[in-house]
Image (spheres, coloured by chain):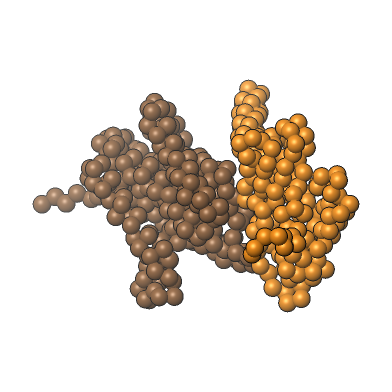
Chain colours: A orange, B brown
Amino acid sequence: MKKAVTALLVLSLLLGGYLTVAHISGGAFSTLGLLLGGDRGELRRVALQFLEDIQFKDFQSAASYHAPELRENVDIPFLIQRLFTVRPEALDIMDYEVVFAEVDSGGLRARVKLRVKVKLLLNALINEREVILYFERDSVDDPWYMKLEDSLRQLAPDTAKKS
Amino acid sequence: MSTPRRQSHVLAARYWDCLLGDLGSLFLILAQAPLIGWLCAVVWGSIESDTPGLYFVLCLSALWFGCINACREIVKERAILERERLFGLSTRDYVISKVWVLAALGAVQVVLLQGTVEWHLQLRGPMLLELLALFGASVAGTGLGLLVSALATTQERAVFAVPLLLLPQILFSELAIPSNLYSDVVGTVEKIMPVHWAFRVFEESAALEPRWHMVALSLGVLMAMCTVLVGAAMVSLLPRREVVT
C-alpha cells in the first residue's frame, strides 16, 4: 500500500513538473489537451487549428481567425494558391507542426512559424514549406487576430512612388 | 555475498547512494545537458531551422555524456572491486549495476538536452523516436566509457582516452566529407560508429518520406552496439589467471 501511494505521488509530481515545463515553454511540449502555455500556447493552438481547417478545406472556419471586419472579405483559397503556388484542390496538406511561436516585447504582435508537409496532387510530389503566420491584437486583454490576409495580399503598386 | 540478481540491486543502490552523496558533481553532470542544448538553440535559432548538423551535434553530445559519465567509474574503485571479488562479487553484476545507474543518468541528460532544444526550436520528426536514438547513443557511450575504465590503469588515462574515442565519430562522418566521397575503408569504419546510427534515426525520421524500416534497423544496430560494448567491459574485467614461474 505504501509503495503504491509513493508511486502515485512520484507519478503525480512528474506529471505536475512536466505540465509546468510545458506551460512555461509556451506550449513547446504537448500540453495533453490542456489550455496551458499562456499567449504562445494560445497562438500555437490557433495556428494549428487554422491549418487543420485548410487541410479539410473548411475555408469559412479558416477565415474566422481574422479580425471580424475582415472575415467576410478574406479569400482563403486565393491566399493558399499564393502561398503554395498551387490551387487548393490540387493540394493535400499531409502534416504540419509549429517550429516556434514568439510574441513581441509589447505583447501586441506575434508570429508563429510552421512547417507544413504538402503533397501536390497533380504530380504526386511531396515537399515541405515553412510558413509564418502573423498575429496582432489591440490590447493584452483582446484575442489574437491573424494577419494572413494582410501579409499575403497582392498589393497594388503605388503609382505615386518610383519603383 | 548475496545471489547474483540481488548483487546487482545492492551494487546499484550503493552506487546511487554514492552519486547522491556528491550532489555538486551530480548537478554538474546534469547541468551540462541543458547548457549544450541551449548553445545549440542559440546557434540554430539564428537560422530558425534545424539542419543535419544539429542532429549530429545532439547525437555526439549524447555519446559524450555517456562516455564521460562512465570513463572513471570502474578504474576509480578498482581496489574495492578486486577486494570484493575475493568475497564472491560477480563481475557481470558489478558492470550491470553501473549500466543501470549510468543509463538512468543518461536518460535524464538526453531528455534535458533535447527538451532544451525543442523548447526553442521544434525539430523535424517524432520527438520520442529521437529521444530513443539519443538514449541509445548515450548508453553506447556508457558502454564505451566502461570499457575504457575497465582497461585503464589510472583515472587520468581513462579521461585522456575519451577524446580519442570521440574524434573518430566526427572524422568518419558526413560532417567531415560527403558520404559519396567516402573510400571503402571510411565507409566501413563509419558503420561501427555509434553516432552514425543515432544520426541515421534523426535523418530518416526527419525525411519527407521516412523509411521506417531504416529507423528500426538503426535503433537495432545501436542496441547491439550497446550490448557488445557492455559485454566487452565485462570480459575485460574478468580475473586474469596468474602465471607462476
What residue do we see at 73% from left, 58% from top?
A152
User: Of residues B213 and A58, which is closer to you in this image?
Assistant: A58
Residue that extends furthest to the front in the rendered view of this protein:
A160
Q: Left or right: where does residue B52 sit relative to residue B156?
A: right
Residue that extends furthest to the left in the rendered view of this protein:
B245
Q: Left or right: where does residue B5 sit relative to residue B18?
A: right
User: Of residues A75 and B211, which is closer to you in this image?
Assistant: A75
Residue B23 spot, x, y in % from top left: 41, 27
What residue do we see at 74% from left, 33% from top?
A139
The C terminus of chain A lies in quadrant: bottom right
Residue A122 spot, x, y in % from top left: 76, 76
Asked whether residue B14 appears in the rendered view, the answer is no
Counting the numbered discs, the total is 0
Residue B201 spot, x, y in % from top left: 54, 60
Q: Left or right: where does residue B122 sit relative to residue B107?
A: right
| Quadrant in the rendering for residue B75 | top left
The N terminus of chain A lies in quadrant: top right
